[in-house]
Amino acid sequence: MPLEHPVCGANGRTSEAGSPSLVPVGFVTTPSSHIDKPSLSLRPLDGMSTQANRAGLCFLAGKWVRGFAFLWSFVRRTLREINGPAYGTNLASAKKMIVAAGSSIALIVPLSNGAIKGGPHDFSASATGYSTYTYGGSLSTYTNPCQVCHIPHKAPDAGGATGASAPLWNHHPSLNSSYVTYDRGNSVTFNALGLTATLGSSAACLSCHDGSIAVNQSYNQTAPSQNGSTVGATAYYAPTFAIETATTTAGNWADPIGSGPYLARNDLTHMHPIGVSYSAALARDPTLKPLASSGSILSQMLKGPSKTMECSTCHDIHGVIGASSTSSHNLIVDLNNGALCATCHQQ
C-alpha cells in the first residue's frame, strides 16, 4: 500500500517487493548512463501536475526528517550509556557527523541501470565472448555490451550505407538492400491515406532483426567475432521469434533458434508500420491522437522532425523512456488494457 505523508498527504510509491520507495510521487529517476552509475537527478513525471510534483518533494523531505530524527535519538541514547561525563562533548561531535551523513543518505533512491546491462541485448551476460573485443594495437581483450551496436571511434557515417541512421553505429548492415514496407502491402485502409514509408533508425534494429547478419559481426568485419577474434568464431543470429521479416503470418519458422542467416527475407508488411511520419498521418487520419507537448511520452516516442514511427517508438532497449526498463520487450508503455495502442490511437 502507498504511504501517506502525515502533513502533506503525498502518496509515496512502493517497490515491487512492497517496501516503501524513497522516490517521491510525481518524479522519476534519470540514469546518467545506460551502462554505468545512475545519477541522483530527479525530473517531473510526465503528465503530473505542479501540485503533485510539490507533494512529491514534500514527501521526500518528510522521509529525510523522520529518518534523521530516528538516527539522532538512537545516537543520543547510545552516547549517554557509553560516555557518561563526556556525553555532552561527544554528542556535539556526533551531531555534526550525522548531519553530514544524513545529507547523503537522504538522497539515496532505488535506481535502474537501464535495460542493456543484464537485459536481453547484453551479449556479455554469458561466456560466449560475443561482446569481447581487442584493444587497438594490443592483444589484450575487454568486454563491452555497448560495442555490439556502438563504437566511440572510427564509426561509419551515420547517414551512409553502413551507418543505419544510428549514432556511432558499429554493427554490420543488413544484407537486404531494401525492404517491402507497409505502404506497399495490401491494407486498403492504410493505403487510402496515401502515406509513404522510409526507414530511419529502424534500419539499425533490422541489421540484427531481419536475421541476415550475425549479432556478433561489426561493420568493418567480413566475419563474426568471438573473444576478440574472427578466427574460429561462431556466428550468433537472432532467434526466429525475434526476426521481424516473416513471409507468413502463421507461427515461427521451423529453423532452429539462431541458425541463420535468413536471407532474402525483407517483408515488413506483417508488422506495425515503421518509417511513417506521424505528423503526415495525423493530417489524414482523424482517429489518431494530436501531437502532445514536448516532454510527454508520445513526443519522446516519435522520432526526428517528421515525428516518425520507428522500432524505437514502442521499444526502448536502453530502458530510459517510460516503462521500458521494467516492461516486457522494453515497451515504453505497457500492453495491458491496450495502453500502448491508446497512446496514439483514439479507438
Image: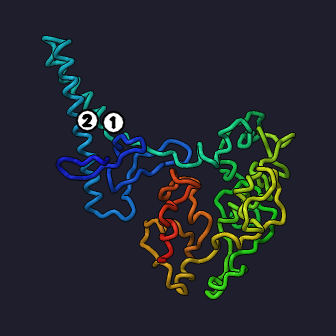
Q: Is residue 73 above or below residue 120?
A: above
- Pick whichever, 321 or 266, lies toward us: 266
Q: Earlier in the sequence, mark 2 or mark 1?
A: 2
**Where residue 67 is drawn, which disc sits there?**
2
**Measuring 49% from the left and 61% from the top, which residue is drawn there?**
336
Few, some or many residues within 10 Å of mark 2 (<14, 14–19, 20+): some
- Colour pattern: rainbow
**Where residue 105 is drawn, which disc sits there?**
1
Dot 2: what SS?
helix
- Pick whichever, 167 or 333, lies toward us: 333
Q: Horizontal and vertical percent for residue 340?
A: 51, 66
Residue 163 seen anywhere in this rendered image of the structure:
no
**Where residue 278 is drawn, which disc sits there?**
none
223 relative to 280 in the view: left or right: right
Q: Horizontal and vertical percent for residue 35?
A: 56, 45
| Residue closest to the far front | 250
Q: Is residue 99 above or below residue 78?
A: below
Q: Horizontal and vertical percent for residue 296?
A: 43, 67
Residue 237 seen anywhere in this rendered image of the structure:
yes
**Numbered disc total:** 2
**Measuring 29% from the left and 34% from the top, which residue is drawn there?**
102
Dot 1: what SS?
helix
Q: Are marks 2 and 1 in contact (CB under 8 Å)?
A: yes
Instruction: Residue type at mark 1: give it.
Output: Ile
**Measuring 63% from the left and 88% from the top, which residue is drawn there?**
192
Q: Is residue 327 above or below residue 122?
A: below
Label 2, label 1: how many angstroms apart (C-alpha)?
A: 9 Å
**Measuring 47% from the left and 44% from the top, which residue is drawn there?**
38
Instruction: From the image, state whether disc 2 or disc 1 is nearer to you.
Output: 2
- Pick whichever, 42 or 94, lies toward us: 42
